[in-house]
Amino acid sequence: MVIPAGIFQMGDIHGIGAYDEKPVHTVHIRKPFALGHYQVTFDEYDRYAMHTRRELPDDEGWGRGRRPVINVSWDEAVECTKWLSAQTGERYRLPTEAEWEYAARSGGNDEIWAGTSDEKRIADYVVTDASRTALVGNKKPNGLGLYDTSGNVWEWIEDRWHENYDGAPKDGSAWLEAGGDKWGRRVLRGGSWSDTAVYSRSSVRVRGSADFCNINIGFRLAQDIP
């Protein structure tokens, strides 16, 4: 899905978030980019893993197919994007944190969750408080046609973890080394099936080691547009 350029307010715009979601700051996404309609599925990741003779990630007995891939680390997700780029000649990557939030909020709207700010409608858009992952696209998309940007699985982001937004880039680029987490941890966004809805807010951010895998973590592909 092509995400248009635009300007938005990033962070805890509703005043209900944590310290790491502040300060709210203006970000200018200067160039359009693309994001996958869905989180990367087992079907897709398994093709890559088999082609490169990598171990298939565990599906916990829930099934593979159109469920979002889980038990994949940041390192593994990045290697997948590099392989796909080499195979296609296109530049695939993980989204930056600013790109992800801008897209999740339907192009920088004031949505608390991806697709809605109405707490009574969360179940229409978000896979949360569940016993396992759901098939991708099982809920309604947000205003840009993206599914599961809130809920289902946490999504790895390109950026290195920072404790707050002091000094964050204002052009939508990835925030990497400068002032970053000394352990090299990476950002995760979107919440998951195993969390309550509060963790699926569009501005919520958490961190994980680059080699960390879990049953509620996957990723979504971004692509540069020439």
Image (cartoon, grey):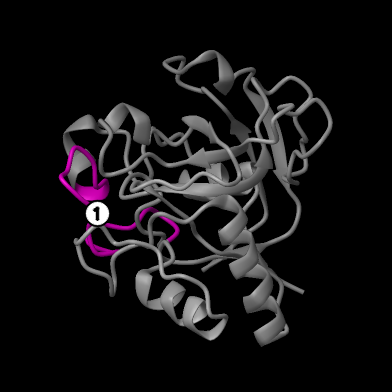
Q: Position of residue 166 (x, y in %)?
A: 74, 19
The answer to whether any part of residue 107 appears in the image is no
Instruction: Report the residue at 40% width, 64% height from top.
Output: 57
- The image quarter containing residue 76 is bottom right
Placement of 38 over or under 201, stated as above or below: below
Q: Nearer the viewer, residue 172 or 209?
A: 209
Residue 23's place in the image compared with 83, above or below, is above
Q: Is residue 216 left or right of residue 174?
A: left
What residue did someone put label 1 on?
133
Left or right position of 24 against 132: right
Predominant SS of the magenta segment: loop
Looking at the rendered structure, the kind of residue marked 1 is: Thr
Q: Position of residue 113 (x, y in %)?
A: 36, 38
Which quarter of the rendering shows the C terminus? bottom right
* 47 in relation to 71, above or below: below
**Which span of residues is magenta-colored?**
124-144
Q: Residue at x 84, y 31 (%)?
A: 178
